Image (cartoon, rainbow, N blue to C red):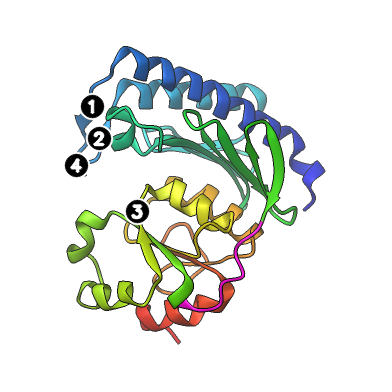
Amino acid sequence: MNLMAFERELELAKILGSSAGELALEYQRRGVSAEDKPDDSPVTVADRECEKLIASEVLKSFPGDGLLGEEGANREGASGRRWIIDPIDGTRDYVRGNRLWCNLIALEVQGVVEMGVCTFPALGESYWAVRGEGAWRNLDGQTSRIHCSAIDRASRAVLCVNGLQNTLKKPHSGQILAFFEQFWTVRSLGGALDAMYTCAGHADFWLEFSAKPWDLAVIQVIAKESGLRYFDYTGADTIYGGNAVLCVPALEPVARTFLGLP
């Protein structure tokens, strides 16, 4: 499917990423506190209000579409299309007043993520992709196509790992330190930011131990359009596996060995 088929959807997602970002920034400037959800992840009024804003505007433009959002948006559509929304990805960063958080807006069509936009309001940068049309970044007002790096060995690669505090609770924990040792360096700035930096060639391998579909939908389409390999811990190309790996093509054997995959 070509870009023109999703031009209107892409433009809407960019506008809503910006609008929701401004709303979140306003809450952050005023000061916002978090409460804990049942899974111990934090949520704020800004998360909820940003999701309401995005969901409402999506349905105004595409009333037949479905919704799936982190903060409760859940609507079956009649079109075979579903918008997948994370209104503030990185709420822990958000409530601490730093700039590493983003919002994520994706469009899934018949079970395939066709379009995704990742907006970092406090950093002034955004990333997007439409399946088959490449991956793109706007930074300081300049738009350019992005591509993964050409790094071909772990000893020269940057590994990004999300959720380091839970490393010992996750699968393969007994191998993780030896796995880290293969790499040139290890970073953990935040899930989506590390993923986008991997897409843009600033890192080479991204490991996500635990994630939901709204965390992964945008990342999946941008990563694949940037030339990265994307799969979950079973080797499946899905946003519903609960975890994910991104890596440059040359490091796919390293990933598969770590995960025990053929």
Say whether residue 63 is visible. Answer: no
Mark on residue 34?
1
- Residue displayed at 29% across by 16% down: 31
Between 104 and 119, the residue placed more toward the observer is 119
Q: Residue furthest top?
A: 30
Residue stretch rendered in magenta on the structure: 147-154
- Residue displayed at 44% across by 80% down: 254
Based on the picture, tell me whether residue 48 belongs to the magenta stretch: no
Residue 18 point in image, percent of width and height: 57, 25
Mark 2 and mark 1 in contact (Cβ < 8 Å)? yes
Indicate the amino acid at tag 1: Ala
* Residue 95, above or below 78: above
Mark 3 and mark 1 in contact (Cβ < 8 Å)? no
Q: Under tag 1, what secondary structure?
A: loop
* Residue 59, above or below 127: above
Q: Earlier in the sequence, mark 3 or mark 2?
A: 2
Residue 7 point in image, percent of width and height: 76, 37
Q: Residue under label 4, please give it.
A: 40
Based on the picture, tell me whether residue 151 belongs to the magenta stretch: yes
Q: Residue under label 3, please give it.
A: 188
Indicate the amino acid at tag 3: Ser
Say whether residue 256 is visible. Answer: yes
Mark on residue 184?
none
Mark 2 and mark 3 in contact (Cβ < 8 Å)? no
Q: Residues within 10 Å of mark 1 (few under 14, many from 20)?
A: some
Of tags 1 and 3, which is closer to the observer? 3
Q: Is residue 10 left or right of residue 194?
A: right
Q: Residue under label 2, please give it.
A: 42
